[in-house]
Amino acid sequence: MISFVLAVCAILAAPSLGVPRQDDSRRIVRLSGDAPWAASRRALEAAGCPPERELKLVSALVVRASPACSEARLRSLPQVVGVEEDAAVSLPKEGTASPAGSGLANGPGDFSTPSRRDKVRSLVSGTLSSVFGHHVENASSFQAPVPGPSQAEPERGWSWNILRLNLPEAWKTARGQGVKVAVLDTGIDPRHPELPNVDGGFNAFDPAGSWEDVHGHGTAMAGIIAGAPNPERGMSGVAPEARLYAVEVMDDNGMGSVSSVIAGIEWAVANRMQVISMSISFSKKKMEEGDTEILHEAVRKAVAAGIVVVSISGNYGSRGVSLPAAYPEAIAVAASDPYDKRFFISGRGPEVDLIAPGVWIRELKPGGGHTRNNGVSPAGAHVAGLAALKLSRSPGLGVEAVRSALTAAAVPLPDLSPDEQGAGMVDAARLLGAGGAP
């Protein structure tokens, strides 16, 4: 009993996991496809509901609800076919990878055996997650075990995730040349010396504003997808010659909404992107409380336009795969650790398509820096890079053909169920038919 009380107290004393800031008054108003756009805007304005944002990809307008602009009032308009909340979306909470007090550096060859403290911390966190259904991905409450000798990286060699995906062999065949990847995230730092291939971007909150990254998450994902090789640190993007586009759908605090994500997808479609990477996550339960068709429609239209959409399974563990990854048109990616185990907070369920590295990942930081991190987000970025590799090897390949190729090149990990890993871990050389791989 004492142990139980201490465990509960530890949870209560832990830093807040964070709740996405949300403007509950915003509504997405779906319009009839037959209604003229300008006339629909005028009708909403006359009803006291002036539109704040247009989402032409899905024939919708965003308005702010008020006593004069109630949901009942909106639904009474003949042009309106649906109304839903502009629900909040957030970045998964992720932890820095160096164990506290370990003295480990971030350079190559810095792996060691997990300490007893780290093993216990991981075990307790996983147990609490299973017992309480609690979301335990938090920088101060979780530190990943450090890979042991069998996962050690050679001195001045590539990091474990690059080796695990068999990328050095694949790069002999293709490197993502010219493939356009939209990173729907917090923006990208275009001045980072290891991101020379950032070709532009879009700010979903202010189309005339900057899309440069302040938060850091988008820069980290961009580096995993298409960062320039840095052998001194053992780092490289999966597809280092792909072209990156910063689509800022999350603000400087890592918060966004359904409408900001849809605006980013709309930009990607209009600008003929080939891959969309979305390492973002909606709570599946939250999204299922209301109509989610508007976001699903945006994803469907992106895929119909020939864009491969990659997202993450989320960090709700056994509670299921979060949106937008759960949509059948998206490629849902779970996260693994260097031991080929599922990162315990990685969402699992029948929607999972693939698994990719997510723990102890070297990442880029705005301003030219580097760090290590743990999370589900890097897993999605790895697969977005793999999709770019395949498209550079086979230009003109359709979305379903890319999905099939990724699945066919995946190798199931032992001891993991299909709900945890989908088809398994992609062998990049096999994906490209490189080095005699099938």
Image (cartoon, helix red, strand yellow):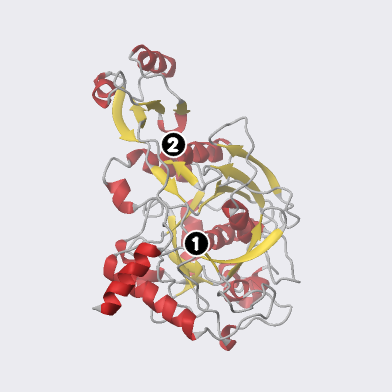
Which three-letter amino acid code belongs to the residue tagged 2? Answer: Ser
Residue 135, located in which quarter of the rendered image? Answer: bottom left
Which three-letter amino acid code belongs to the residue tagged 1? Answer: Glu
Q: Residue at x 56, y 74 (%)?
A: 100
Secondary structure state at the residue bearing disc 1: loop
Q: Which mark is residue 369?
A: none
Q: Earlier in the sequence, mark 1 or mark 2?
A: 1
Other residues around mark 2 within 10 Å, as few (<14) / some (14–19) / many (≥20) = many
* Figure quadrant of the N terminus: bottom left
Q: Can residue 413 be seen in the rendering of this structure? A: no
Q: Is residue 297 above or below residue 68?
A: below
Residue holding disc 2: 259
Q: Can residue 344 be seen in the rendering of this structure? A: yes
* Figure quadrant of the C terminus: bottom right
Camera-side residue of 22 and 389: 22
Q: Tell me whether the residue at label 1 lies in contact with that at label 2, contact meaning CB atoms closer than 8 angstroms.
A: no
Camera-side residue of 255 and 19: 19
Residue holding disc 1: 94
**Relative to residue 161, is residue 194 drawn left or right?**
right
Q: Point out residue 390 in the picture as x, y percentages from the top left corner.
A: 59, 60
Q: Is residue 267 above or below residue 334?
A: above
Q: How many marks?
A: 2
Camera-side residue of 348 and 15: 15
Q: Point out residue 134 in the picture as x, y percentages from the top left corner.
A: 33, 63
Q: Which mark's residue is nearer the viewer, 1 or 2?
A: 1
Camera-side residue of 232 and 19: 19
Q: Is residue 305 above or below residue 206?
A: below
Q: Point out residue 81 in the picture as x, y percentages from the top left corner.
A: 29, 27
Q: Residue at x 58, y 43 (%)?
A: 247
Other residues around mark 1 within 10 Å, as few (<14) / some (14–19) / many (≥20) = many
